[in-house]
Image (tube, rainbow, N blue to C red):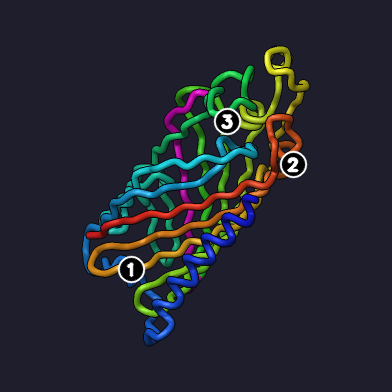
Amino acid sequence: MHRTIFVVIFLGLILFISGETSAAEPQKKQDQYNDQEDKDWSVRLGAIGMYKPEYEGSDDYDFQGFPMIDITWRDTFFLNPIKGVGAYFWNRNDVKLGAAVGYSFGRDEDDSSDLDGLGDIDGGATANVLFEWAIEDFSLSARYEQQFTGHDTGFQVHAGLGYSLQLGKKTMLKPSVKTTYSSSEYMEEYFSISAGQSTQSGLPVYEADAGFKSLGLQLLALYRLGGHWGLQAMAGYKRLVGDAADSPVVKDENQYLLGVGLSYSF
């Protein structure tokens, strides 16, 4: 059911976007969407709605709205929800190294009835170390993330390989593959079941070790509506693997995400 919803809606968006741009003349592959090449500041503000699992591993989905904020200054200082707020201390020869402070929202027991008896996992600030490498239209990225307030959830390393495809003057597609490695502390908090939690929840005792947590695909479409306005559409698929997939907390190893947003760039 979820597969059908995601495929039908997202393919409809892609067909609409492609139809709008199929007659446009080819352009050089550059950041035409933002049109910010000669400006110190690049600012994108807006809102995005996402249809996503109630928690990582859930088989139930809900719709949530989020603000969209993406700000950079001289391609050095940045603020956005994924990287956090920080700066690149190395930016040469298409390679960027940076550091930032972000936030992890944790997990609440009342996010889903499937989490009853497992308790809350407090969110907190995270220390992030970033690596980005542009290879023509390809991009390779890695982000080390460790929470240092709230629960001790260890660290995660997120890695991805993406490709930017410019379609005419108004549309850019960005398909990518992604994976995440999680430490033993993270796996213990999110996927293990202690004896006490087993008694409270009725789930069997389970111990999850460090390892690769997930593999996934994502497709991002950016469409310039006119002026400074833009439309973003995103579809993602992630499969939980290893000890995460075997956890009694996980009701479905296959996780889907669909998002649509509107933004204003200046």
Q: Label 3 sits on what residue type? A: Gly
- Report the mark closest to the observer, 2 or 3: 2
Q: CA distance from mark 2 to mark 3?
A: 18 Å
Instruction: Indicate the quadrant where residue 44 lies.
Output: bottom left
Q: CA distance from mark 1 to mark 2?
A: 40 Å
Frontmost of labels 1 and 2 is 1
Q: Earlier in the sequence, mark 1 or mark 3?
A: 3
Give the CA separation, mark 1 to mark 3.
40 Å
Segment tinted magenta in the rendering = 121-137
Q: Position of residue 70 (x, y in %)?
A: 33, 51
Q: Position of residue 162 (x, y in %)?
A: 53, 63
Identify residue for label 3: 154
Q: Amino acid at mark 2?
A: Gly
| Residue carrying label 1 | 224
Tag 3's secondary structure?
A: loop
Q: Residues within 10 Å of mark 2 (few under 14, many from 20)?
A: some
Q: Position of residue 194 (x, y in %)?
A: 71, 18
Mark 2 vs 3, N-terminal side: 3
